[in-house]
Structure formats: C-alpha cells, structure tokens
Amino acid sequence: MKLSVVIPCYNERDTIETIIEKVRDSGISDLEIIVVDDFSTDGTREILREKLEKVVDRVIYHASNRGKGAAIRSGVREVTGDVVVIQDADLEYDPQEYEKLLKPIIDGKADVVFGSRFLTCGPHRVLYFWHYIGNKILTLLSNMFTNLNLTDMETCYKMFRREVIQSITIEEDRFGFEPEITAKVARMGCRIYEVGISYYGRTYEEGKKINWKDGIRAGWCILKYGLFR
C-alpha cells in the first residue's frame, strides 16, 4: 500500500528538517510526503523552499495563517496514496510506528486507525496534569455522542483509507478538526481501531501551541458534530 503523509506545520524551523528525515526513514517503501506550511513567520518557509522541496513530493504554502484543520484540508485534497496519515511537525510522534498503525488496515480489518497515547507500553513523556485531565474529559464527551470507546480522541496520529478521508468535508480550521473527524467517521460507520503509540511531548517553552481556548472549541465541536448534526 502507498502511504501518504500529510504534515501541517506552523513555525517549526527547529524540527521541520528532522521530522521529514524521520518520515523518509520510517521503513515504508511506497511513501508520499505532502507538507502544508500554514504561513510560518519564523524561517520554516525558507527552510522548506531552500532545502526540503526537493526531498518531499509537494509543499503547499498558505497565504495566511488559517489553522491546523485548514492545513490538513489542503493536504488531503492532494494525496494519492491508498492510506493517509496525519503527522505533526513537532517530533512528539514517531514515524517508526507507521507500520503498527497500518497493520489493521493492511489486514482488512480497519478503515480508520487512531494511535492512542494511553494504550501503550512505549515511552510516554510525563508532562501537564491538566492537559491529561482535559484530554480525558474531551474523549469521554466525544465517546458519549459517537458511541465509541476511544481512549485518545485528541491524538494527532489518525490514519485513514484515502477514500474515507477524501469523502469528508473538513470544516474546522483549527484544532477542532480532531472531534469533527471523529464524529464524522463514526457516523459513516467506519471500522475504527486503536493501537498504542509512544509520545514524546514538548513543553510550551519548546514550542507547544495548543491552549485552553482550543479545549473549549473542541468541546463545542463535540456538541456541534455529535448532537446538532
């Protein structure tokens, strides 16, 4: 199977080269890499133009900062692989685990696979207590409206059969993408699996961007896509 990797990035000059190298070294033989720069202003865009355009399949440049969901929407339109995975550019998630995520799809059991940070015996950096609690609350609320039993709705690592993700209209521009896409694949009746993954989280000093406002928006999106649709 050909795997398409969509990498949304915004102000990741310290990690963008490393993550692309890690994706290329992931062990997947048939690989497509699409990077979407969401109007970075820290030099990421220049690194992409000068060094990285020649080692990936495509770089899409947004003319303004539109958010992670908008970047994923732009990337998903262009993928050609059999399977699509979202890869953050911040090194929190390890591309060496693609094969683990792919297995339920290759085996013909899954249409969508979530990589759970809480179903794992792998390394998991110890960080923010209230982020952990917020994640648990949002996942619980999402499960209540989707009737799923996910452990990590907010995970970055979501892998889809291409026809599934390209059949969905992504409406959310920011981090509301996570509950939106979860509600929509659940409503479609997709076969959804979870596999445990490692997690190398970073601090705000190291560049973490999600904040409490995004948590509130995620809660609203759970209601919007789970209750009002």
Image (spheres, grey):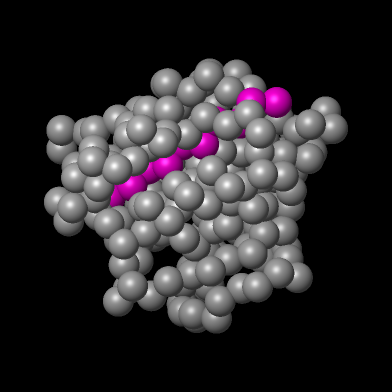
* Horizontal side of residue 98 vs 78, given as left or right: right
For the record, the magenta segment spans: 1-10
Query: Residue 14: image x %, image y %?
Result: 31, 62
How many numbered tags mark residues here? 0
Which residue is painted at 23% across and 38% down in the image? Answer: 49
Q: Residue at x 53, y 73 (%)?
A: 133
Q: Is residue 94 left or right of residue 192?
A: left
Residue 2 is inside the magenta segment: yes
Q: Give residue 143's position: percent from left, percent from top.
A: 63, 50
Q: Is residue 138 left or right of residue 109?
A: left
Say if residue 105 shows up in the picture: yes
Residue at 79% over, 31% down: 106
In the depicted view, which residue is nearer to us: 47 or 81?
47
Q: Main secondary structure of the magenta part?
A: strand
Quadrant assignment, res 113: top right
- x 49%, y 70%: residue: 201
Residue 229: percent from the left, percent from the top? 48, 30
Q: Quadrant of residue 102?
A: top right
Q: Which part of the image, by quadrant, shows the N terminus? A: top right
Percent across and percent down for residue 58 are 37, 28
